[in-house]
Image (cartoon, helix red, strand yellow):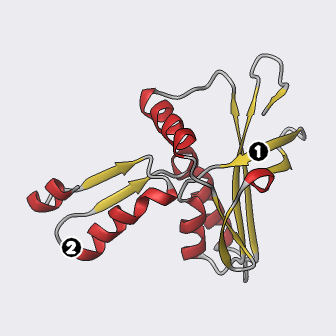
Amino acid sequence: MKRAQADGVPHVAFSDAVGEIGPVVAHAIARPTRAPILMLGHAFGGTATLAALHLAQELQRVDAIAIGCVVDADDRGGRALQAAFEQEAQSGQAPLALQGGKSTWLLGDAATRRFVDAEGVERVGRAMPLPDVVSLAAATDAREIRVDIATRDAATGVRVT
């Protein structure tokens, strides 16, 4: 990132967990005109967050945003995604949520949530330390924000947690 700023070229920061974006943000603030920095660590490439922001535009007020994402057990993504998930699992970072308008690190059972997916199946999701909550909080006045990811067995449709 320092090299990109020194050379005046854009920098793309992939898989930045919410606890790791501090240095990226600090560099952007310290040298805002040197080079653009794009942070790409949102769940599903930001698709769910962008959809929530699109829907929020049509509402007068947004009090809460709860996103439940479901992935197939055999959809592991590429090497970079797997490395990012392994790093997050080893780091022990707690996921972030917004509760009562305050940022809250979710610990233990608080990091899991039940939700019903688009097929009507109840899933048990787990929050991840991704920047979706921070982005949604910055763009809306919601006081409650949470993003969870559940895994399903693609072959049988059985929930895997």
Answer with left or right where residue 43 lies relative to residue 37: right
**Residue at horizontal 54 percent and vertical 67 percent from the top:** 135
Of the numbered discs in the image, which one, if any, rests on residue 112? Answer: none
Q: Position of residue 138 (x, y in %)?
A: 54, 75
Q: Residue furthest top?
A: 155
Q: Position of residue 33 (x, y in %)?
A: 19, 74
Query: Mark 2, residues whose alpha carbon is within 10 Å: few (<14), some, or many (≥20)?
Result: few
Q: Position of residue 25 (x, y in %)?
A: 36, 68
Query: Mark 1, residues whose alpha carbon is within 10 Å: few (<14), some, or many (≥20)?
Result: many
Quadrant position of the N terminus in the picture: bottom left
Looking at the image, which is closer to me, 8 or 114?
Answer: 114
**Residue at horizontal 69 percent and vertical 28 percent from the top:** 72
**Residue at horizontal 55 percent and vertical 54 percent from the top:** 130
Q: Secondary structure at mark 2?
A: loop
In the rendered image of this protein, does residue 136 appear above or below residue 39? below
* Among numbered discs 1 and 2, the one appearing first in the sequence: 2
Mark 2, residue position? 31
Mark 1, residue position? 125
In the rendered image of this protein, does residue 106 appear above or below residue 124? below
Q: Secondary structure at mark 1?
A: strand
Label 1, label 2: how far apart the Cα atoms are:
38 Å
Answer with left or right where residue 156 lies relative to residue 10: right
Q: Position of residue 13 (x, y in %)?
A: 35, 51
Answer with left or right where residue 10 lies relative to residue 47: left
Quadrant position of the C terminus in the picture: top right
Amino acid carrying mark 1 in the image: Gly
Whether residue 71 is visible, yes or no, is: yes
Q: How many marks?
A: 2
Whether residue 32 is visible, yes or no, is: no
**Residue at horizontal 44 percent and vertical 27 percent from the top:** 79
Amino acid carrying mark 2 in the image: Arg
